[in-house]
Amino acid sequence: MIKLTDCGAFLVNGKEIIPDDENAAAKLKQSGISITKEQARRGTISHGILSAHNCGGDEQNLKLKFDSITSHDITYVGIIQTARASGMEKFPLPYILTNCHNSLCAVGGTINQDDHVFALSAAKKYGGVYVPAHLAVIHSYNREMMAGCGKMILGSDSHTRYGALGTMAVGEGGGELAKQLVGRTYDMAYPPVVGVFLTGEPAKGVGPHDVAMSIIAAVFEKGYVKNKVMEFIGDGITKLPAGFRNGIDVMTTETTCWSSIWETDDTVKEYLEIHGRASNYKKLAPAQTAYYDGFIHVDLSKVEPCIALPFHPSNVFTIRELNKNAKDILAKTEEEGTKALGAAGLSLNLKDKYCNGGVWAQQAIIAGCSGGIFDNIMAAADIIKNGSVGNGNFSMSVYPESQPTLLELTRNGAAAAFLNAGALLREAFCGPCFGAGDTPANGELSIRHVTRNFPNREGSKPGEGQIASVALMDARSIAATAINGGRITAATEIDVPFGKYKYFFDRGIYEKRVYNGIGRALPQTELILGPNIKDWPAMPPLPENLLVKIISFITDPVTTTDELIPSGETSSYRSNPLKLAKFTLSRKDPSYVQRAKEIQGTEELRRRGTAGGEMEAVMKKIHGIPGFAAMELSQLEIGSAIYARKPGDGSAREQAASCQRVLGASANFALEYATKRYRSNLINWGILPFVITDEKAFSQGDYIFFPGIKKAVQEKAQTIRAIVLAEKTAEITATLGVLTDTERQILIDGCLINYYAAAGKS
């Protein structure tokens, strides 16, 4: 079904794959091809798009400018505030401000709607696009109105993926969008490109989530596509409708790849024509010979309906396999989940979900940028019509991705099919994907066609004795499960005729409600700042010498951004840095905030020259280090730090880093960082992203001394001297990885805002 190559490969004529082994040269010669690997690398679709957007003269070190950028109402306030503080006077490129995360306006009084009012005033003042709440989820609007073949779009949401429409899209932290808003570039080394070769045709009842989860399961743990581009090619693409492709593509984020791109054809052309943007189409395909740094072979005909059990999209089983071995699989999942959550006193109740010969769910959701797609909902409607979800504990909700989609579902009768079956049809909202809508009861299992099933993504709070679970499934199998009263059922197990439905896009919905100020900034417009919208507090620059205390030590295999700063109700405070920071690590390490504030207090006392207590013992240890007998407390600064083995999987939200910084964090330590976007967030907020090789070198509560840290960063030191001031003083080696000159200066200045302020003065 899914096979990975263990080496790079040449693709010839879009069909023949020649592995880059000892026989490659001979096989290329037999095919009459004379080309070097480096020449062939330029034959990918990715190379053409990246080259067209590279503003620098170096192909290996890219400086990218995007065609447009996009944010939702959890992130755009912070981005605009950062750009304002950095000297922005107008949006220099189209900026789409959507309202699909904090759109319920049900938590925190007026503050969610205050953010929306702020966004509209910003769109007018700076010349942007404002999409009102409930009108469309962020990625639906961008697919429908902004994506185009050969374009690049940058978004402050990790699932910014429009590759199936020929657009290379990237999800990043807000700092990277702020750079675009002040005319700077997105800088990175040229990424490796992995070919995803699709063949065959999906079986009846198999959907895009099944394909996506199968790929994620094959590549995630191996890190096969981490920070790389996934380039979809092969004749299997022609068998997939546009919505099916979009459904696979949006889930590439969960592989930890950097971006994605697909071959385009008449199906994409038709999609763009339907949306009134035929001019945005052009054929994209690899050159006659193209080189890929790896290959993923996907036989679509062998993909089965799947389920990703808690707590990661890569924890995948076929539904057939789950039902056959339910007791063992659920017991193991519960054991691993309880251990990962550190919730020894809580029961996930997963084993209890197996009874009466089947596995049972209590809730079903089809929603957002992955599930709420027209094709998915129509397939689910075909299954559920004339059926019933019943009047028991099982419930079902469907959230179409946009109001144009909902209008079409109403016109063609699909909406009636769901309502007649007892399912609820809801607004365009991303909440079920991150814990802000349809939270199940304690101990329940919710099956969802959404993007993630991380711990707490459904809204429960294990720290308060609440725990529920999410399993990911495709909309088709969710509908099959619904008509079976909640018994997990693969859509391939039922005999339903699936229709082929043409989508009619009504652009008038957007024309009547969306404010489009692109190219028409109105600088006299006053920004409307609600009481919760606050400026960023001042951040200190990198000192000559740094002392950090490890105040959280996390040994989970992966630490998600949801654990670093929880989603759900905390989202309402994302426009208030100080209020939001109070939730940092609240579900993973509830004492973190208190410890961070204690270190902040110590640093404040140091600045006043009155720090004593613990600092006396620490300074005594520093004085015992050869060459530092005369070091004074006034010659260093004190900050906090966390250690996690592999932090940053998941959302692009910059708050996963900025909240640490607001609380006085100076550094993170990791064996590796899960994603580029999280590491970029750390840098943009002035947090040193250290990489170490031995987590036993220090423990929670230890201080680590970095003498000459500023000089080391300035002089591009390959390794950073670090001295652990534990019971025994010991020197360790840390690295900062590859840093661009701009990133180094951002760290030296203390954060992106400081960097632009300093640049403005020079």
Image: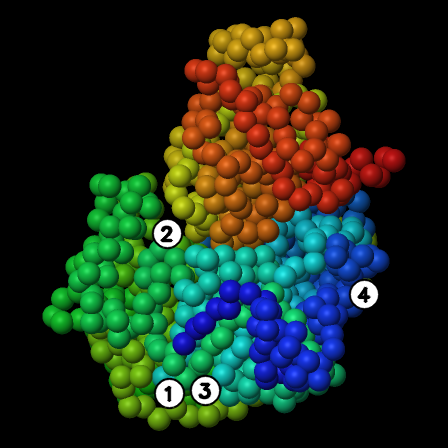
Q: Which residue is mark 1?
A: 204
| Amino acid type, residue under disc 2 in the picture | Pro
- Foreground: 757 or 712? 712
Judged by depth in the image, the label closer to the viewer, 3 or 4, is 3
Residue at image point 64% right, 21% down? 707
Name the residue at 73% across, 66% down.
Answer: 38
| First reached walking from the N terminus: tag 3 or tag 2 | 3
- Label 2 to label 1: alpha-carbon separation: 32 Å
Q: Quadrant of residue 270?
A: bottom right
Q: Nearer the viewer, mark 2 or mark 4?
A: 2
Labels 3 and 4 touching (C-beta < 8 A)? no
Q: Is residue 246 left or right of residue 711?
A: left
Residue type, mark 4 in image: Gly
Answer with mark 3 or mark 4, whichever residue precedes in sequence.
3
Q: Secondary structure at mark 3?
A: loop
**Residue under pointer 4:** 519
Sequence-earlier tag: 4 or 1: 1
Amino acid type at circle 1 is Lys
Alpha-carbon span between mark 4 and mark 1: 47 Å
Between residue 700 and residue 577, name the one nearer to us: 700
Quarter containing the N terminus: bottom left
Which residue is the site of mark 3?
A: 201
- At 23% from the left and 61% from the top, the residue drawn is 329
Residue 627 horizontal/vertical position (percent) = 65, 11
Name the front one of labels 4 and 1.
1
Mark identifier at residue 725: none
User: Circle 2 sits on which residue?
Assistant: 455
